[in-house]
Image (tube, helix red, strand yellow):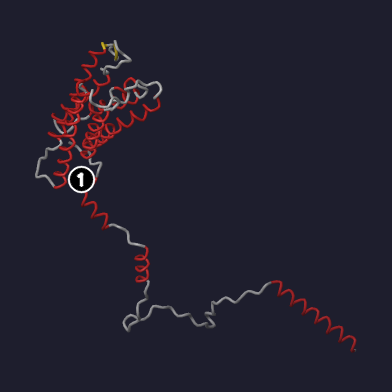
Amino acid sequence: MTSIEKSTMIHQRRILGSLCIALVPSVLLFGLFGLKTNPTDWYHSVSSSFYSNANICMIGLIFATSIFFFSYRGYDWKDRLFSIVQAITVLGVIVFPNYNYTKPYTTGIFCLPSRLSHTFHCITAGTFFITIALNLLLLFTQTGKEPTEKKKLRNKIYKVCGILILAAAFAMFILSNGFVKQYLPKNLPVGMICEFIMFTSFGFAYLVKSEAIKRFNDDYENEKVVTEIEKPVSESENIDKIEIDEKPEEPTPENPSKEEKPEEPTPENPSKEEKPEVSESVIGFFQKIGIIIDTSLEIFKKKKK
């Protein structure tokens, strides 16, 4: 795998992780703008939001997720197989909407009977969550050499996220059963809570795998050490350094003082010190005084004769 292909794969993982984490919060946020027109159970699951004003957000994010799964190549044929299955099944979630009382007869782009579409919806959604859990548990934990401490930590994260996805999927299946559901609060969004756990676990695992969270990377400690070494000195240290650098050398017989003494004025080299300039108005004043004195002396001499 070339460096360009690896970089592309890392960015795809980051986008996939971000899309999955953003799905549930975005659907709930957009759905709040249609509280007066949405079905009463629109927030019970991501699938139920298909019939609310948040459907465009839900469809857009899931469709984008499917596209990235289709384009994701991975390291080998196993990664590729899992990504294709995940792309098809997550796309099936929006192609075959779940049953809703607002569309009791036909639904979806194929106008299938609502109950049949609901069956396909449950199959595709269940397959998607199972495959992403197996992806984390079986593929993400693989290593071709002796695992580092950071790799062991990442494997624990993948296993925890995979187990959370399976546990949430199982809980969603049990709690959606009519017999169990009657003992739960009427408006408790069990599906949305379980889907939030599953999508967030999957997205977090993908962000860790894509090296987006540097704390879990193998070279995190090395980068930290390099940063501390290259840390710029403080302003006080800079001042001390400047003072040390500018300290004059003491004169020695071998190395006399390099301080330049001012040159003594000579006839050939007169002093270069500039005399202070006298204002022109002052000079003009004294010239006028001189002219008046000269004129007065001439008049006095004439009278004397």
Give x and y (percent) for residue 58. 31, 25
Answer with left or right where residue 132 lies relative to residue 94: left
Q: Residues within 10 Å of mark 1 (few under 14, many from 20)?
A: some
Q: Amino acid at mark 1?
A: Asn
Q: Residue at x 24, y 31 (%)?
A: 199
Quadrant housing the N terminus? top left
In the image, 20 versus 186, the foreground residue is 186
> What residue does disc 1 label?
217
In the image, 185 versus 4, the foreground residue is 185
Q: Residue at x 31, y 15 (%)?
A: 101
Quadrant housing the C terminus? bottom right
Is residue 85 among what the camera can see? no
Give x and y (percent) for residue 30. 37, 28
The quadrant where residue 244 appears:
bottom left
Secondary structure beneath dot 1 equals loop
Answer with left or right where residue 20 lies relative to residue 245: left
In the image, 31 versus 279, the foreground residue is 31
Give x and y (percent) for residue 159. 15, 37
Q: How many marks?
A: 1
In the image, 248 versus 95, the foreground residue is 95
The quadrant where residue 187 appears:
top left
Q: Say if 152 sits above or below 79 in the image.
A: below
